[in-house]
Amino acid sequence: MLIATFGPSTGWVGKTITLENEQFILQDYGPVTAGSVMEYDRQGHLVWPYAGMRAWVASQSQTPVAVPAREVQPVTMRAAVRVNESDDDMSDVALIRWSCLEDDEACAACRAMEGAVWLPSAIPAASAPLHTCTNPDGCCCLTVMEIAQAGPDPDDVVYVRSLGGVATPQQMAKYEAALEAKRYAQRKDKDKISGASDAVSAAWRLEKTDPDKAVTMYRESLTVFKAGMGTPAGEWLPSHVHFTYNRLTMLLVKLGRANEALKALEDHDALRLPSEGSKADLDAMEKRKERLAKKLAT
């Protein structure tokens, strides 16, 4: 259902706001709140299909239809805590971001705000679209409401809150670069662990045809698994470690390498891993250790 259309006072002229599945949807962006729709209206950017629609959206945002104009302040990143009549409507908003929508014609003032992020309770003194924008085609900027249920990353919210509720574009760029470096390292760890898991599967198939090669592959995989313990990518590793040690020690016993098998079982016990995974693996290793200890003691 068509809610409103952006008029010629903004670079968003012709774009629509519709109601889909009980959500207000801004064309080419996504969900926005009723409060955001009324803010665009307050700035004079919307054309309504009929007067009753404006009143209905206002009732959804708990914002009076007649909203008094306020002076547009200079662009600044100083936070200001607000008391907002539509606080209830903002309850599902986790973060708000300033976006120039990659507009090459964005003015210097708009570009200075690109990437700024704030909590709903702490807003920059300027609002988008920016009335003082010098772009001859009108300001294309908007404030992007990130709905809590749809993400953002909870770490983003914690970071912005740690800065008092507002993060400058420079602060966000530095934070996001560090976060991406961390995620890249995690992806590398995950790729290594995934490769080691594949190697374990291959070693299992080699146990009869090339047991020495299988032993080497089991050992190499365990080195990767143990290095990954304690990382986010390694949360599910204990069961893999139990299985791999069980196959390795069983194969060493078959090859007549009892001392190596017992040493490997002692290494496994020293890890003190949670007893996740196959109970059969754990029971088999315990019995194998007892038999080897008796055999080597004689």
Image (cartoon, rainbow, N blue to C red):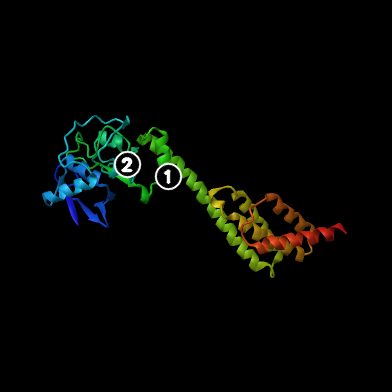
Question: Three-letter amino acid code at disc 1?
Answer: Pro
Q: Which residue is mark 1?
A: 154
Q: Residue 45 vs residue 285: left or right?
A: left
| SS at badge 1 | helix
Q: Which residue is mark 2?
A: 96
Q: Residue at 59% x, 50% y: name it.
A: 228
Question: Three-letter amino acid code at disc 2?
Answer: Ile
Locate residue 269, reporting x and y percent: 71, 53
First of labels 1, 2 by sequence position:
2
Q: How far apart are the two marked residues, 1 and 2, measured between alpha carbons?
A: 14 Å
Q: Is residue 5 visible?
A: no
Locate residue 251, reporting x and y percent: 72, 64
Q: Residue 57 vs residue 154: left or right?
A: left
Locate residue 266, reporting x and y percent: 74, 53
Tell me the quarter of the picture where residue 119 sits: top left
Circle 1 residues within 10 Å: few <14, some 14–19, many ≥20: few
Locate residue 252, reporting x and y percent: 74, 62
Is 198 situated above or below 224?
below
Q: Residue 187 vs residue 200: left or right?
A: left
